């Protein structure tokens, strides 16, 4: 019994130390910039040994990946209520995108600091990088849930497969706009979300209608051609089922 209590206490202390190092690193990144902040400086500011800092985070990139995971978990939690209550696709997508900006708002300035590094195609912090793939998959799965839990029917199997990835890419465009948005309270970003969600959901609804099928086929062929022989997307986990509600059916 005492061993269990001691182990729990050690785990809790380790989590606290890890969180403290991450919080300290984010503060230094904001104050000094990402490139100028070293792991040694982070350890000194956090009051831990350098080896201890490396025990929890193998590099600065791992610190930022941990930050990304933290913000995604905040976003996911903020989406639960809207996804549980709404079955309208527009309302679900609108709520999820608004929640993304709401939860990211405290990190607005810091996101601008990170943008220069994350925009480098060779950087592991690039959202399209191999290192970012696990978090990209989790975020894409959230958009799969947005679509699967809605009343909207998508008859085209290929479009149904591609849609979560397309919505993830769309939300990255929204984030890029937000990073550069200096309007009070990021009001322009919220307006952009409002208008583009209407456009996107209308396009989804009509995409498989006979007049639009040639355009849809061309678009899907383009996506397949850009992807090449090996799909860059990992398989998505199945979305949680919601009894009594039909998702998307082919």
Image: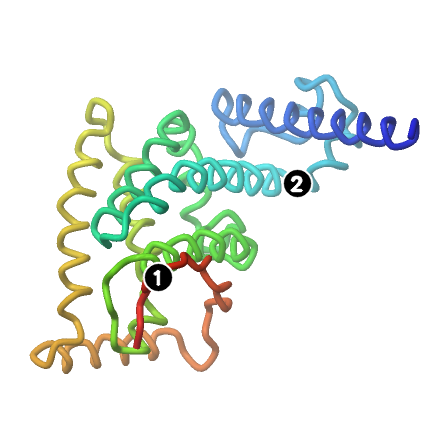
Hey, which quadrant is residue 18 in on the image? Answer: top right
Q: Earlier in the sequence, mark 1 or mark 2?
A: 2
Q: Nearer the viewer, residue 61 or 41?
A: 61
Question: Could you tell me residue 219's position as x and y percent?
Answer: 22, 75
Count numbered badges in the picture. 2
For the residue carrying disc 1, how many other residues have a C-alpha within 10 Å: few (<14), some (14-19), or many (20+)?
Answer: many
34 left or right of 84?
right
Element marked by disc 1: helix
Question: Could you tell me residue 142's position as x and y percent?
Answer: 41, 52
How far apart, in angstroms, are the residues tagged by discs 1 and 2?
37 Å
For the residue carrying disc 2, how many other residues have a C-alpha within 10 Å: few (<14), some (14-19), or many (20+)?
Answer: some
Question: Could you tell me residue 78's position as x and y percent?
Answer: 40, 36
Q: Quadrant of the N terminus?
A: top right
Which residue is the site of mark 2? 59
Which residue is the site of mark 1? 148
Hey, which quadrant is residue 107 in on the image? Answer: top left
């Amino acid at each position: 019994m005492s061993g269990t209590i001691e182990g729990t206490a050690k785990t809790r202390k380790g989590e606290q130390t890890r969180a403290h190092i991450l919080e300290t690193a984010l503060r230094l990144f904001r104050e000094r910039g990402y490139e100028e902040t070293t792991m040694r400086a982070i350890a000194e500011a956090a009051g831990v040994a350098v080896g201890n800092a490396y025990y929890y985070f193998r590099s600065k990139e791992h610190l930022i990946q941990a930050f990304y995971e933290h913000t995604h978990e905040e976003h996911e939690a903020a989406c639960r209520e809207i996804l549980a209550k709404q079955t309208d696709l527009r309302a679900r997508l609108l709520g999820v995108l608004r929640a993304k900006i709401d939860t990211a708002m405290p990190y607005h300035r810091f996101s601008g600091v990170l943008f220069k590094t994350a925009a480098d195609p060779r950087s592991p912090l690039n959202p399209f990088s191999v290192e970012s793939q696990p978090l990209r998959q989790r975020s894409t799965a959230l958009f799969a849930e947005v679509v699967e839990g809605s009343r909207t029917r998508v008859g085209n199997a290929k479009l149904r497969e591609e849609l979560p990835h397309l919505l993830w890419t769309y939300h990255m465009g929204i984030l890029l706009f937000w990073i550069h948005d200096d309007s009070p309270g990021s009001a322009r970003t919220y307006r952009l979300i409002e208008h583009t969600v209407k456009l996107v959901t209308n396009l989804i609804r009509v995409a498989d209608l006979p007049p639009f099928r040639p355009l849809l086929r061309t678009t899907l062929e383009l996506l397949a051609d850009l992807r090449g022989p090996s799909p860059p997307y990992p398989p998505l986990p199945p979305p949680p089922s919601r009894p009594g509600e039909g998702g998307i059916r082919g």
